[in-house]
Amino acid sequence: MQQSKPLISVSNLQVSVGDKPLLSNVSFDLNEGEMLCIVGESGAGKSTLVKALQGMMPGHCDRFTYAPSSTEVCGAIPAGLGLDQARWVMQDPLAALNPRQPLGRSIAESLHKEKLPKDQLRKRVLSALDDVELTADFYDRLPSQVSLGQAQRACLARALIAQPKLIFFDEPLSALDALVQKKIAQRMESLRRATTTTYIAVTHDLGFAAAYADKVLLLREGTVSAYQSRTAFFANPQSDYAKDLVAAAQSLGALPEAAA
Amino acid sequence: MAVLFGITLITFTISYFAPGDKAEAIAHARYPGDFGIAPEVLQGIREEFNLNAPFFSQYTHWLADVLRGDFGVSYSSRTSVWVIFVDNLGETVTLTLTSLAIGLAAAFLLSAVAVRYPNTIWDRGAVIISSIGAAMPSYWLALLLILGVSVYLGWLPAYGTGTFAHLILPAATLAFWVMASQTRLLRTFMLEAYDQPFIETLRLRGIPEREIFSRHVLRHSFVPALTMIGLDMASLLEGAIIVELTFSRSGLGSLLAGAVLSRDLPVVMFLVMFFATAYVVINSVIDGVQHLCDPRNIKKAKAS
Amino acid sequence: MSLSQSINLSDSHPADPLRQFTKRVGVATLVLLGLWSLAIWLTPYEPAAADFLNRLAPPSAAHWAGTDHLGRDIATRLLYGAGWSLGLSLAISLTGFVVGTVVGILAARSGPAGDFAVMRVTDSFFAFPELIAAVTFAGLFGPSTSNLVIALMVVSWMKFARLARALTLNLGESDFITQARLNVLSNGLILWRHLLPNILPSLLVLWTNSWSRTILSVSGLSFLGFGVQPPSAEWGAMLLDGKAYMQTAPHIMIFPGLAVLLAVMVINLTGDRLRDLMAGKT
């Protein structure tokens, strides 16, 4: 379903630290409710892209728009923390949660800005836990007392509870094992459909992209190697590098079905 | 380094603010006897030693002297501070090295036995001894030793310096502390060495346990253990001072105590700076040694 | 059936071993304090009450630890001495703990220039071994309780500063702190909720260590004459008294030393247990 204006769009993003270019000429746009999968090898710049979009790394672009806060920027992306109504699920759930704080409070922190009364806050947290299929007794547990999958679900709950327009995912499944990966990926997908949230997911797992992405952006050493819709990317990859990657994934059996 | 500079500054500040009229102290040292000093003489001394100048001026003058190696003259004995220092250094070094040697040897033996036969009385005993040793006030142990060995048994002299017999009890006291703290560390190191994967490989190759232990485990824990000692240098020095004072031995400890009580500032300042600088230097050396040893250990492990 | 229902880690209400341990230690401390106060209230003797007819008496039913050279009851003096030896060292080490932690956190949170300056100052103080500083200070300014306390306080804060700084720097990079910042938590709240609870356990272990070392320093310096002066009932000062009567009345010097040993051992073991708990968790 095409919107008239994309939720987020970036044109010619460059990120350099010192004189070392980490990203150059990255462009994409994403409509509400879509999922963009940023794929590529380690060090290709995927995490850098996510950070730069949130103003956490020095980025410079021709044009950057972000609808929820009506932002339109040409030039340097203002340094700051995060985007309005956006949340970020990180790679290692145990690092992303305060080890000395119960999960419930960590999740509630996502709503800190809204300053809700205590009982309302608790209700929202319980509802968020339910969304990610965690029972209410997880409210009081410490991160060390739950499994990795459960901790990552808690991080997901923390992102969802704020009902954001955009969620960044940085390799959300790579710390988990296969069965759990599948469950959580399915949960993420059903939640996205239900709430029409926009996802930008960094992953090195092409299978995930093949299953859930609407658009695929392939990064290689800081430059865009391919930027296509999912069907186009897997049927007819834009670059030789992309072709090799897709072929390799296929031979490993990592892709669900190659075609639409 | 900035730290050394800071040391000199702090030392000088302490002596600057120390109570007691320095001019008087100098005067009494110069003209021994129990009579009052004429004000003109005091004035003259003040000018001679620059005591009327503001803080920073005095500090820079003093620092300049120190950097030239001139540490001044003791107030009480009128001999050069350096000479006094060297005279007393030997005793302290003897005590420290002896205790270190005995303590380390004992610690090595004890922890080797403890690790070799885990969960036996040796292992438990080693842990208990190191716990006690860490908590034991050394001056109390000293008193107990004096009571038992000198007073009741009459085997060894209790106080004073001079003969080898005089060294035994103090060295034993300090060595006990060394042994206790090092046993704990060594035991941990050896246990870690034992857990290394390459030990299992050796076992599978049929090498007897004894040989595994002596050739590989022991050797690998030796070097890291040595470097760990450096970290506890401060405690070792402190322990040496306490032991010296308790046994009334001559050495840097007694020198410091005496100088402090008699307000012999040049000696005090020098000793304080010496200890501080020695500590900093030793730590830097240990840091450097640690860096050198790490990759070497890894290489050794790969080779065997 | 959801995934979380098929994997059930713990049925009971989650127990945090760290918090349990802290509670137990707290209770034990209160009990000990209660017993100590009770003992002081119950003892028929005064710590300074001399009884020249009963000098140098060995332990007996009347005097559980015997009497010293002035006929004072040693057991009572031991009890009062706990207040001196343990109390003073507690005050000293706590001050060092608080001051050092504050300095360390400040150093870590200020820019590179501030950090450098603070750490150079810290390192300069670090170079002076505790005992030497205390002896010098107490000796120059006159041996007394207050000089001893000042001297020891001045040299006990640095290790806390170093550790607090390292931990804060380490933690500052953490993901969960980034998340908290993204959620617009104020710096103060981040400090209170996220930073402190995570650095305190390590600092507490260091503090138990510091407390026991300070006990040894306080009693040691008093024994050498540089600290608490007789007739105060501090354990080290009692040892000094006992030294002269070693031959005729050895019990005078045995009990105070034993008290120091036991106190330090208990504190050390508690600290060890705390450290083990933390290692087991993190």
Image (cartoon, rainbow, N blue to C red):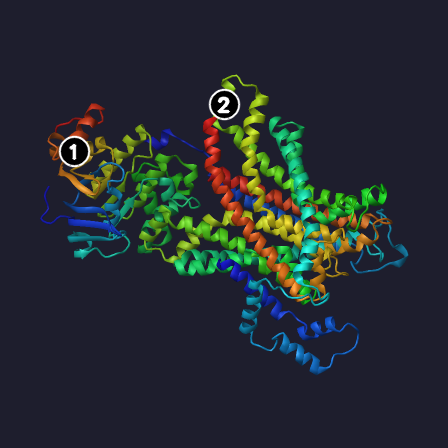
Tell me the amino acid under the disc marked 2.
Glu
| Residue C87 to residue B56: above or below | above
Residue C259: % across, % down: 72, 48
> Residue at image x 45%, y 32%?
B299
Q: Secondary structure at mark 2?
A: helix
- Circle 1 sits on which residue? A242
* Residue A124 in sight: yes
Q: CA distance from mark 1 to mark 2?
A: 45 Å
Chain letter of the residue carrying label 2: B
- The answer to whether C243 appears left or right of B198 in the picture is right
Q: Quadrant of residue C157?
A: bottom right
Query: As drawn, which residue projects farthest toward the right?
Result: C53
| Residue with the mark numbered 2 | B200
On the image, the x and y values in percent for residue A90 come to: 31, 42
Residue at image position (61%, 64%) is B70
Chain hosting mark 1:
A
Residue pictured at 54% horizontal, 49% vertical:
B283
